Image (cartoon, helix red, strand yellow):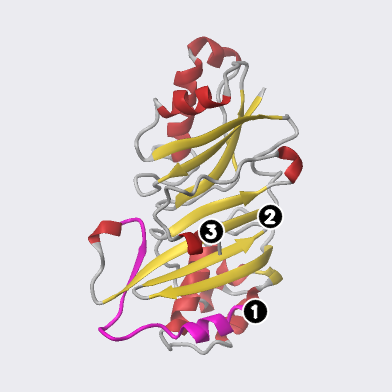
Amino acid sequence: MRIALGLQYDGSPYSGWQTQVNQHSVQDELEKAISAFVGEESCKDFPIRTITAGRTDTGVHALGQVVHFDTNVEREAFSWVRGINSFLPSSIVVNWAKEVSTEFSARFSAYERTYIYALQAGPCRSPLVNARAGYLLLPPNQWFDVDGMKEAVPCLIGEHDFSSFRSSECQSKTPVKTLYSIEIISEEPWLYFSIRGNAFLHHMIRNLVGCFLQIGQGRQKPEWMAEVLEAKNRQIAAPTFMADGLYLTKIAYPEGFAIPEPWLKNAWLPTQIITA
């Protein structure tokens, strides 16, 4: 049978989602926990291999990650949740579990993904959100040109070649992706970016945030964003911004799969940001 799981995790202790040689990944911890729960005998016939909706990078967090795996073990839905969580570190939690058809793929059935970037800015950083939010030093009584950043949004919406925002390590077959919406919400000393699209390139959101912040600080005009996009040249865009404030918040699937909504009631981000 095929089991889908909804996950939340603090990405700061990990080298990202994906298993890598001599690295500590979220996938390693999850597969180890599932294997411990189903038992050694079951794993001989069905080694646990998880497929994820979004392969988050080093230090990136998740509030609405979805994965699936195949197994010959039958359990009630909540037994999967309680059992797997008993073997997971405190930085990772399973929020829900559901038996799904073998036609479901956490990765390939997804048609939409939403990420939120949470940024704190000002003369002093907050130690209480260390590694859980981005930070940018601003002098006292100075804030971003939020209207200027919003003015730069429309050129990014729709289907485009996002090569200018693509990491050199990106493994995507194409740089062409579709963005459906970008919401920028200012609640000084916090700035939030909620970005929704069909899929994303490696470092794409962090590179977009870096460019928005150049505009927000008055270093570039709003129309510069369209120039960067059109150039299809990573060298002219802003540096990749830090991973700390990036959250995978929601994956959308066709209604027929009846995948549960992310468990966001215990998320520290403000409700209006999560639902933007």
Closest to the observer, 53 or 170: 53
Amino acid type, residue under disc 3 in the picture: Tyr
Closest to the observer, 91 or 78: 78
Q: Which residues are magenta?
A: 130-153
Q: CA distance from mark 2 to mark 1?
A: 25 Å
> Within the image, what quadrant is residue 98 found in?
top right
Q: Residues within 10 Å of mark 1 (few under 14, many from 20)?
A: few
Where does the image place residue 214, in percent across and percent down from the top left?
A: 45, 81
The reply to whether callout 3 and callout 1 are in contact (CB within 8 Å) is no
Q: Which residue is mark 1?
A: 154
> In the image, is 11 to the left or to the right of 77?
left
Q: Residue furthest top?
A: 41
Helix, strand or loop at mark 2 = loop
Query: Taking 172 as reference, is 228 above or below it?
Result: below
Residue under the point 57% across and 52% down: 250
Where does the image place residue 123, in percent across and percent down from the top left?
A: 24, 77
Q: In terms of sequence position, does the residue under pointer 3 or pointer 1 come before the other?
A: 3
Closer to the eye: label 2 or 3 = 3
Q: Which quadrant does the C terminus fall into?
A: bottom right
Where does the image place residue 257, in percent across and percent down from the top left?
A: 72, 38
Closer to the eye: label 2 or 1 = 1
Q: In terms of sequence position, does the residue under pointer 2 or pointer 3 come before the other?
A: 3
Where does the image place residue 146, in percent across and percent down from the top left?
A: 47, 82
Helix, strand or loop at mark 1 = helix
Residue under the point 47% across and 59% down: 271
Q: Which quadrant does the N terminus fall into?
A: top right
Amino acid type, residue under disc 2 in the picture: Lys
Q: Which mark is residue 173?
A: 2
Amino acid type, residue under disc 1 in the picture: Pro
